[in-house]
Image: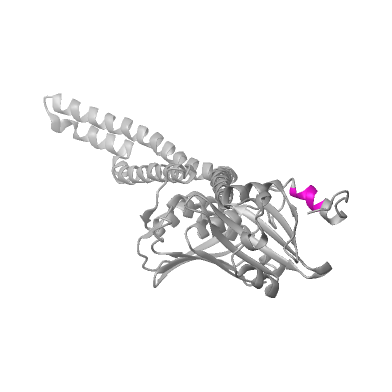
Amino acid sequence: MNTPNEGPAPSLRILEALGRRLREGVLLFGADGRRLYANDAARELCRACYPRDLEQGLSLDGLLPREALPHAREHGRWSGHLSFGEQRMLLVHAYHAEEEGGCYLVLMQDMRLIRAHDQELLRRHAELNVRLTAAQEKLLQAEKLASIGQLAAGVAHEINNPIGYVHSNLGSLQEYLHSLFALIDAYERALRSPDPRAMLPEIDQTRARLDIDFISRDLPQLMTESREGIERVTRIVRDLKDFSRSDRDESWKLVDLHAGLESTLNIIWNELKYRTTLEKSYGELPLVECLPSELNQVFMNVLINAGQAIGERGTIRVSTGHEGDEVWVEVSDSGPGIPPDALQRIFDPFFTTKPVGKGTGLGLSISYGIVAKHHGRIDVDSRLGEGSRFRIVLPVRQPKAAA
């Protein structure tokens, strides 16, 4: 304690100013055990936990276990938990300094406050996690829709092309029907006449004039082409619907990755077909546990990047395989390759080597996150002048905690 009429030393004044702001108990003792300072928090903790409080003569020896002070003198510090029944426990640190004759600094923390603080941190962490997950979902959906927006013209062409020849075929079918009805009319008149055989020359003339033989050959092919065109449009619309939907309610499923690849190629084919030769080398794959819509976005991002890297004309090779508990999907291109300095940054958010307006710089970053979410990895190998290879490696089954 301070002697009467003697103000505290400068270091003690600083300690007092800080001590009033601390929730932890702070005690300072001299080498002889004389108490030099105690803040309000220390007084309250001692009053609540010890049989005698500081005003009643609680000493340094009574404050700490027997081994604490020797340990602090030898090692400079001692830490331990002191239990006071089931309801109260203190975390206590004792520090020893030899300067200016020696002193002991004791810090006391109420474990209930520490637990409450930890619970608050956990609550805030959970809240931030929810917000981060929601933000990630929005970003994923925005990038997905942006990708479809960039492909809109190509997708429209892929839809308009089959619709165009279906429309043309319907025009031909209408003409064929007029011709067939005219022939049927000739047959009906022959059946109603007294001598049907007398009408045979007129019927033969009608068949030749309307070219019924050609119609009979062309009609099945026309119907087949029209059906294929409608099925093509149906597939594109279905694939777009599956691809663009939000994944909030999507669950982990056992999926054929080849079906996902074909669905993705169906959407982006117009982007690739005019400048690339597509080669496929599919291996035997088991059903893979995944979020199919998210993986389809990864396939699309990698395939579009490969097509854009090629430029005028080149080859994209898509291959798959199965090794042990993992499967892989590999996309390689015959483009110019990626410079080493850019290769180190291709998965960084917003990093892009494309001209302004040609990309968001999020495609590969989001793809990396999706593959990591599936406990997989993306391996990249690129050499200047030789092209690039992206290999997506995925586990066949997800860890139970993930699924």
Residue closest to the eye, 78 or 245: 78
Q: Residue at x 40, y 34 (%)?
A: 171
Residue closest to the eye, 316 or 4: 4
Residue closest to the eye, 403 or 143: 403
Magenta stretch: dominant SS?
A: helix
Asked if 353 appears above or below 225 in the picture, the reply is: below
Residue reaching furthest to the bottom: 74
Q: Left of 112 or right of it: where is 251?
A: left
Residue closest to the eye, 358 or 324: 324
Q: Quadrant of the C terminus?
A: bottom left
Where does the magenta region start and end? Answer: 14-19
Q: Quadrant of the N terminus?
A: bottom right
Residue 257 screen position, x and y as percent: 41, 59
Colour scheme shown: one colour
Asked if 214 appears above or below 291 in the picture, the reply is: above
Q: Is residue 302 visible?
A: no
Q: Residue at x 52, y 65 (%)?
A: 377
Q: Residue at x 62, y 65 (%)?
A: 79
Residue reaching furthest to the left: 194
Q: Left of 20 or right of it: where is 109?
A: left
Q: Is residue 254 visible?
A: yes
**For residue 48: magenta?**
no
Residue 314 screen position, x and y as percent: 58, 64
Residue 221 screen position, x and y as percent: 33, 46
Q: Residue at x 43, y 38 (%)?
A: 168
